[in-house]
Each structure stands twice: as structure tokens, then as C-alpha cells.
Image (cartoon, rainbow, N blue to C red):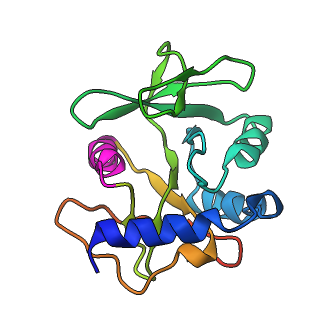
Amino acid sequence: MLKSKQRKEIIKRRRKINQNNIEINFNKVLKLIKKNNFKKKIVGGYYPVNYEVSDLTILRELKKRKFKISLPVIKNNHMMNFYEWSFNEPLNVNRYGIPEPNQNNLVYPDILLVPLVGFDKNLNRLGYGGGYYDRLIERLTKKKKVLKIGLALSIQKINNVPITKYDKKLDNIVTDKYTL
């Protein structure tokens, strides 16, 4: 099945779920972070849109534990950078309808919480098709070790994500039911 067809099918499936009752267990994410023993604690999160699993509760909990929180800002040429953000700071809505922080303090996350459309058992991620996270992961991993955690509903799992040489795997995927 083509990626575009898979995306539409999974987003349709995701829309039907009442996500108000579904939360990703913060302790599962914290356990992965502790296991990887990061000295610096900069977390790159995302502001959920289009029925994505929300990471906002996780980000709030990490902030209480003295982690620096950051969100992405989309740039030209399918690039994005992360900027430090606090829950009391306003966000600007970009051309895709995604809230972004002000571009004050550029950071390079040690831990990335990654939204996804679909995934498979091999930790391959199906995104929206722009390659933003693939480019970011490639750039960041050249600078330092980065823990890449995808957040999803278990219903977003598919048998096989078709991958190309540009696609970057995640280190873990945490769903409402299990962790890969």
C-alpha cells in the first residue's frame, strides 16, 4: 500500500477514537528516559494537532522534574528547529495551523517526543510526508546522542511501513497499551 493511502486510512481510524479518555502513561516515558541516563535534560515535544496523541501532560511532568521543554518551529526547505518554551508563554500559529513558540532560545533536544501517523514493529515511523522529523533526526544525531520516542495509539500500528533511505527509525514507541 502506498504511504499516502496508509496515512489517510490511519488518520481516519485515529479520528474515530475519543482521545479524551486515552493517555500515554508518563511513567513509561520517564522509565525510557532514566534508562538512557541523560545528563542534559532538553526535551523536544510537539503541540498536538490533527488528532495526534497529546504529549502535553508528559511535558508538564518533565518540566516539574527540571527538564527544559522545547517545541518545533517549521523553517523553509522542510527544516525545523526547536526553541525553548514554557507553558505560560504564548504560541504563534504557523501556516499549517500548528502552534509554535517564539524563536528566542534555540536548543538541541536530547530527548525527542515524536508524533506519528503510523508505525510498525521495527520502529519505523510513518509521518505526514514532509520529512521534517527525518531531517531533524539526521542533523541532531550528527551533533549528539538523541533519544527518539514516538507517541501513538496502538491502533496506529501497521504491518509494514514502506521506508526509503531518508527515513529515520525511532528508538522506542510508547502507545496507550504497550511500549516497543
Question: Which quadrant of the structure image shows residue 163?
Answer: bottom left
Q: Nearer the viewer, residue 29 or 37?
A: 29
Residue 63, image x, y percentages: 73, 35
Q: Is residue 126 above or below residue 99?
A: below
In this image, 139 relative to 147: left or right? left
163 left or right of 145 in image: left
Q: Position of residue 21 (x, y in %)?
A: 83, 63
- Count all numbered tags in the image, as a single digit: 0
Seen from this angle, which residue lies furthest left? Answer: 165
> Is residue 43 located in the magenta-colored stretch of the structure?
no
* Picture residue at 34% right of the left edge, 71% below the top: 5
Quarter in which the C terminus is drawn: bottom right
Is residue 26 found left or right of 40 in the rendered image?
right
On the image, which quarter does residue 20 sit in? bottom right
User: Residue 60: in sight, yes or no?
Assistant: yes
Which residue is pictured at 56% across the width and 24% down the height? 84
Quadrant of the rendering where the N terminus is positioned: bottom left
Q: Residue furthest bottom?
A: 159
Q: Overall secondary structure of the magenta stretch?
A: helix
86 and 147: which is toward the camera: 86
Whether residue 124 can be seen here: no
Seen in the picture, residue 171 relative to 98 is either above or below; the reply is: below
| Residue range highlighted in magenta | 129-143
- For the point 46% across and 72% down, the residue is 9
Instruction: Give left or right: position of 91 versus 98.
Output: right
Q: Position of residue 141 (x, y in %)?
A: 32, 48
The image position of residue 100, as x and y in percent, is 53, 26
Q: Is the residue 35 above or below the residue 102 in the image? A: below
Instruction: Name the quadrant containing residue 73.
Output: top left
In magenta stretch: residue 138: yes
Residue drawn at (43%, 79%) of the image: 120
